[in-house]
């Protein structure tokens, strides 16, 4: 998947006009890519549309208008676009209260060694976390993950996809629905 180019980004005024019709479509795209694993982890499989939307929304919220600042946002969020032979997700670690969240963000240290995706009968691929989101005493509630599955696995994504976490304090798994698998297959044209 190609990165989102600077030329694809609308200025804030143009985006406000486009947003009314574009936002519902992108939210539907995101919903088909949102996968819950257990009660507290939500994975959002990223693609060009979800990344472009994120950049546009950040520009809108933060009132980013200078070219160098827009290019910085693009550089940052383009890292979320999956490269050849990989899937890419944003992981949200969700707990209701700040106190509970604080306890679990410490308890889930080491999570980067315990998240996997398996496509069909291919060997599971362990997640590669962005280590900038992990401190020595806790992890961030938002994680950016790449799954190096390989092209052969991605071509057989319609054979089923399973996400699982085998952390000692959080052991859960889920099989992606047909709609979720279809969203990933459409990205790869398979």
Image: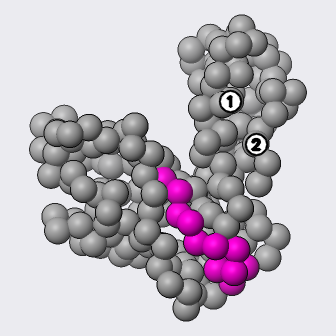
Q: How is the image coloured?
A: one colour
Instruction: Classify the position of the C terminus by image quarter.
Output: bottom right
Question: In the figure, is residue 67 to the left or right of 72?
Answer: right
Question: In the figure, is residue 59 to the left or right of 126?
Answer: right
Which sits earlier in the primary sequence, circle 2 or circle 1? 2
Residues 54 and 129: in front is: 129
Tell me whether circle 2 and circle 1 mark residues in contact (CB < 8 Å).
yes
Please provide percent x and percent y for residue 137.
17, 39
- Dividing the picture into quadrants, the one containing residue 152 is bottom right
- At 27% from the left and 43% from the top, the residue drawn is 139
Q: Is residue 182 visible?
A: no
Task: Magenta stretch: give its range.
Answer: 145-156
- At 38% from the left and 73% from the top, the residue drawn is 164
- What secondary structure is marked by label 2? loop
Confirm whether the magenta stretch covers residue 111. Answer: no
- At 12% from the left and 44% from the top, the residue drawn is 103
- At 71% from the left and 62% from the top, the residue drawn is 84
Q: Residue furthest bottom?
A: 121
Q: Residue furthest right?
A: 7
Please provide percent x and percent y for residue 173.
36, 75
Question: In the figure, is residue 101 to the left or right of 10?
Answer: left
Residues 31 and 176: in front is: 176
Question: Label 2 vs label 1: CA separation?
Answer: 9 Å
Please provide percent x and percent y for residue 88.
57, 56
Q: In the rendered image of this protein, does residue 11 appear above or below residue 38? A: above
Pointer 2 residue: 3
Q: Residue 15 carries which label?
A: none
Confirm whether the magenta stretch covers residue 155. Answer: yes
Pointer 1 residue: 74
């Amino acid at each position: 998947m190609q990165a989102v180019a600077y030329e694809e980004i609308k200025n804030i005024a143009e985006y406000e006009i486009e947003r009314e019709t574009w936002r519902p479509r992108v939210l539907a795209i995101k919903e088909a890519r949102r996968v819950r694993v257990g009660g507290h982890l939500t994975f959002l499989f990223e693609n060009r549309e979800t990344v472009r939307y994120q950049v546009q929304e950040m520009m809108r919220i933060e009132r980013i208008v200078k070219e160098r600042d827009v290019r910085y946002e693009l550089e940052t969020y383009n890292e979320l676009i999956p490269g050849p032979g990989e899937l890419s997700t944003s992981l949200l670690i969700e707990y209701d209260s700040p106190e509970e969240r604080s306890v679990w963000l410490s308890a889930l240290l080491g999570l980067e060694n315990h998240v996997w995706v398996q496509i069909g009968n291919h060997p599971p691929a362990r997640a590669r976390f962005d280590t900038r989101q992990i401190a020595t005493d806790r992890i961030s509630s938002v994680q950016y993950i790449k799954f190096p599955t390989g092209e052969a696995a991605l071509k057989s994504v319609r054979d089923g996809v399973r996400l699982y976490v085998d952390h000692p304090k959080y052991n859960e798994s889920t099989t992606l629905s047909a709609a979720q698998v279809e969203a990933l297959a459409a990205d790869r044209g398979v």
